[in-house]
């Protein structure tokens, strides 16, 4: 390839990567909003995390890492296991993190 052709190829790849990252960010925002809507008294953490992850998959992305939740005194980056029976209660402060993989489409 000529030097100019290589530069054009790199620039094109850069644009595609930027578009992928932007799309992944939008999918993450929608997944987190969906997860917030599920954080109601009586909801199981494992169900909320699973729904957030499925929302990302349904958008056509893979997972960069599992959905993480923070509840009350538990620090961030906690992922419930499949048999976790923790249920949200009235007044529980919580947060979540989700990350679609921009390269796993």
Image (cartoon, helix red, strand yellow):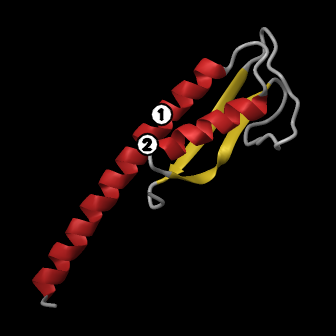
Residue at the image point whose x is 65% and y is 32% from the top: 96
Instruction: Bin the neighbour count of mark 2 within 10 Å (Cα to Cα): few under 14, some 14-19, many 20 and up.
Output: some
Q: Which of the pair 46/90 is nearer the observer?
A: 46
- Choose top left, top right, bottom left or bottom right for residue 73: top right
- Choose top left, top right, bottom left or bottom right for residue 55: top right
- Percent x, y of residue 10: 24, 73
- Percent x, y of residue 74: 83, 32
Task: Give the residue pinned by disc 2.
Answer: 25
Q: In the displayed structure, does residue 84 sit left or right of residue 98? A: right
- Percent x, y of residue 93: 74, 18
Q: In the displayed structure, does residue 95 sit left or right of residue 89? A: left
Looking at the image, which residue sits at the far top?
90
Residue 88 disc label: none
Residue at the image point whose x is 21% and y is 67% from the top: 12
Mark 1 touches mark 2? (CB < 8 Å): yes
Residue at the image point whose x is 58% and y is 41% from the top: 54
Residue 29 disc label: 1
- Percent x, y of residue 3: 14, 87
Q: In which quarter of the image is the N terminus?
A: bottom left
Q: Which of the pair 95/55 is nearer the observer?
A: 55
């Amino acid at each position: 390839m000529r030097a100019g052709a290589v530069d054009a190829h790199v620039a094109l790849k850069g644009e595609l990567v930027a578009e992928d990252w932007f799309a992944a960010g939008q999918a993450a925002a929608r997944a987190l909003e969906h997860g917030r809507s599920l954080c109601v008294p009586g909801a199981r953490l494992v169900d909320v995390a699973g729904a957030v992850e499925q929302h990302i998959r349904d958008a056509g992305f893979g997972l960069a890492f599992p959905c993480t939740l923070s509840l009350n005194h538990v620090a961030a980056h906690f992922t419930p296991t499949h048999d976790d029976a923790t249920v949200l209660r009235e007044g529980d402060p919580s947060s979540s993190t989700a990350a679609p993989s921009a390269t796993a489409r």
